[in-house]
Image (cartoon, grey):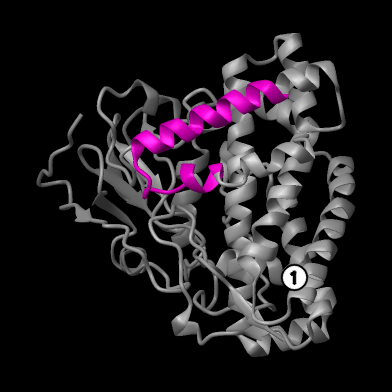
Amino acid sequence: MTQTTTAETPPARFWAIDDLPGLEFDPLLEEVLREEPVARIRLPYGEGEAWLVTRYEDVRLVTSDSRFSRRALVERTAKATGMTAHQIASSAGFNYVDPPDHSRLRKVVARAFTVQGMKRLRPLAQRTADRLLDEVERHGPPADLMAMLHGPLPLSVVSDLLGVPEEDRSRLAGWPDLIMSTGPGPERSRQVKAELTAYINELLELRRREPREDLATVLAEALDRGELNQEEAVSVTTAIQVSGAHAVRNNSANMVYALLTHPTHLARLRAEPELLPRAVDELLRFIPHRNGVGLPRVATEDLEVGGVLIRAGEVVYASYLAANRDPEVFDDPDALDFDRSELGHLAFGHGPHHCMGAQLTRMESEVMLSSLLSRFPGLRLAVEPEDMVWQSKGLIRGPQTLPVAW
């Protein structure tokens, strides 16, 4: 359904979602957070208009109130205004379901994200980091950390989590980037998702025959008990594989870039390694790690958000990036501050769709940063910041290459 502007509805702003240099914060998000925290927008694809919510408390409301539905997106006859010409996520899994179905799926997946599960994965991640950095050291400067660390380590960790055999991991390496980019186009994205789906079906069948201590085994056993269906199992696995390999790769590289361009913070972290968990959390808040916004929700009844009436059937986007820069919640929000007391950021989302891999992501980031800082005391960018090359048309922001010297 196409919404029209009325006397009660502000005119829509067109949000082009242009590539931004480095870690520059999106100027439209900065503007609406300051001037119109519940704003009307049009995005490059789809039909109609939508609301964009940017204030911290409003974002928390929209992402946790059951009157804003993800499932309702599937039932719409027209595609809502959006960032891509094709659907990134499957409508069968985490992304397009509401409680209680969403709670059912999370309960199954949570069996692989236990404290014991994280303890199992950390030494595996550390061994992989050590091996990769051995190769960086042998290679010598300049070395591209995107190719030599930030790409292979998250792929290895998520493969360990899922239970992907070593000999299959190279097949998975390029799929997440193609799925999570607007550049390749709808047909190529559909082809890649079909290839990944076929592989995941193979993996689930393998783990039925050869159970291990991994997520694929958890899902295969849940399938046999009727706790979820095949399409849901594939969608859950796809979401974890894509976000675990693609998002962590870029986010961790952004962290290294941020530290190398904030020398005072880098020096302090070297001098106070115990500060690392807090530093990682602040980097997660500070870095604008994605372009635009993620999936929207649909209001199922009329309700007010931030003093603005949103009517039933209208589409609402919530910006976690903007919420993390809300001056009502974070003092001096545009500053990187390792002493910040208010660390309740929304980098992993909020509400039912809060990222289940949050602790895994923190662990990987800590392993990468601590290993880099201890191995290479003189680590620095091998190019000027303005000469860095950044990825284009990606949903998750990050360097194309991260050349460093030491």
Dominant secondary structure of the residues highlighted in magenta in the image? helix
Q: Magenta stretch: give its range.
A: 175-203
Q: Is residue 251 left or right of residue 49?
A: right
Q: Residue at x 57, y 56 (%)?
A: 347
Q: Is residue 192 magenta?
A: yes
Q: Is residue 156 above or below residue 75?
A: below
Q: What percent of the width, then of the height, locates residue 207? A: 79, 22
Using the rendered image of the protein, determine whether residue 347 is visible from the camera's viewpoint. yes
Neighbour tally class for label 1: few under 14, some 14-19, many 20 plus, Cα within 10 Å: many
Q: Is residue 247 above or below residue 335?
A: above
The answer to which image quadrant residue 220 occupies is top right
For the C terminus, the quadrant is bottom right
The answer to which image quadrant residue 77 occupies is top left
- Residue position for label 1: 369
Q: Is residue 358 left or right of residue 59?
A: right
Q: What percent of the width, then of the height, locates residue 167? A: 76, 38
Q: Is residue 215 above or below residue 400?
A: above
Q: Amino acid at mark 1?
A: Leu
Q: Is residue 166 magenta?
A: no
